[in-house]
Amino acid sequence: MSKGSPNIQSITQLHRSFGFSKPKHPLVSVVQASEWKKNREGIDVAYKLDLYTVSLKDKRCGFFYGRKPYDFDESVMRFTEPNETVILKNSSYPNELEGWMLVFHSDLFRNTSLEDKIDNYNFFFYAPDEALHLSDSEERIILNCIDLIKNEVNERIDNHSQTVIVSTLELLLNLCARFYERQFNTRSVHNNNIILQVNLLLQEYYDLNYLTEKGIPKVKFLAEKVGLSLNYLSDLLEKQTGKNAKTYIYNFIIDKAKIILTERDISSEELSKKLGFRFPNYFKRLFKLNTGMSPEEYKLLH
């Protein structure tokens, strides 16, 4: 593999770049971690993978995603979307590697139900340290799906293979969504601390008059402040509060609007500007959606 940041666009190119045997299916492959050890080509090179990946590791495999190491002490799963930068570090290689990587091209599920659903699996956009930690029973369930995909690829390419592979892949992703929900629930103490940080950040943003000066804060701003990816923070808030991140921010602002309306004589237009809304009518619609009445009605009632 040449120096720089090559772009791997196909399963065949991936196998060729790392010295693996020719793939048995042009759109999907399961590579065992031990294969990376046998084939030293492409080591210490940053490359962009124009493919989806689902990987599991049992030990320190030496994978880096972006600039962060993929380094956990238990069985974990990591998901990446196309165009993710990946580095396989020679310095991180142990004597024994355990795990696998499922790699698939978007053409695999073209014109299937999965094509419409793939973007709903937010964990493809999570950061490396937001990986899915599996119990032993969960890992066995996932491995059953992987074994079925491997068997289809290796033993019985026929008219039904594509349907079986895609449906198994969709089952695997649905199981991972379930296991992530379990992970959110079992880490409620940590998650509540994150929510507290978000509340403090929003309060500080309001106290410093940034709503007026800078406008409504973006979810990305809050995610960066609490050290999470945008999608992980959004999912955490929705699982813990029932509201997605954008709604959570707007509800905070509407709560401030209620307080101001009961304490000051202020017009809706003036209030919307103070709270960072570019268009007063949008603020009025949002306020009514939240409270069931217009700002003027709310002010009169209170």
Image (spheres, rainbow, N blue to C red):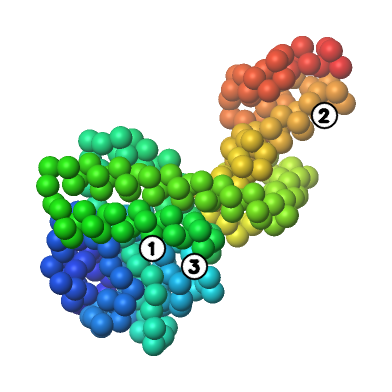
| Secondary structure of the residue carrying numbered label 2 | helix
Q: Earlier in the sequence, mark 2 or mark 1?
A: 1
Residue 93 to residue 182: above or below: below
Quarter of the image containing the C terminus?
top right
On the image, the x and y values in percent for residue 144 come to 37, 56
Residue drawn at 57 percent across, 57 percent down: 228
Q: Is residue 233 visible?
A: no
The 10 Å Cα crowd at callout 2, few under 14, some 14 to 19, many 20 or more, is: few
Q: Nearer the viewer, residue 38 or 5?
A: 38
Give residue 259's mark: 2
* Element on which disc 3 rests: loop
| Residues at circles 3 and 1 in contact by the CB criterion of under 8 Å | no
For residue 11, say whether it is visible: yes
Three-letter amino acid code at the position of disc 2: Ile
Q: Is residue 86 left or right of residue 217?
A: left
Residue 116 on image: x %, y %: 33, 35
Whole-number angstrom distance, CA of label 2 to CA of label 1: 49 Å
Residue 41, compared with residue 146, is above or below; it is below
Q: Amino acid at mark 1?
A: Ser
- Looking at the picture, tell me which residue is in the foreground, 32 or 299: 32
Residue for badge 3:
75
Left or right placement of residue 76 versus residue 170 in this view: right
In the picture, the disc for residue 55 is 1
What amino acid does circle 3 point to?
A: Ser
The one of 297 and 156 positioned closer to us in this rendering: 156
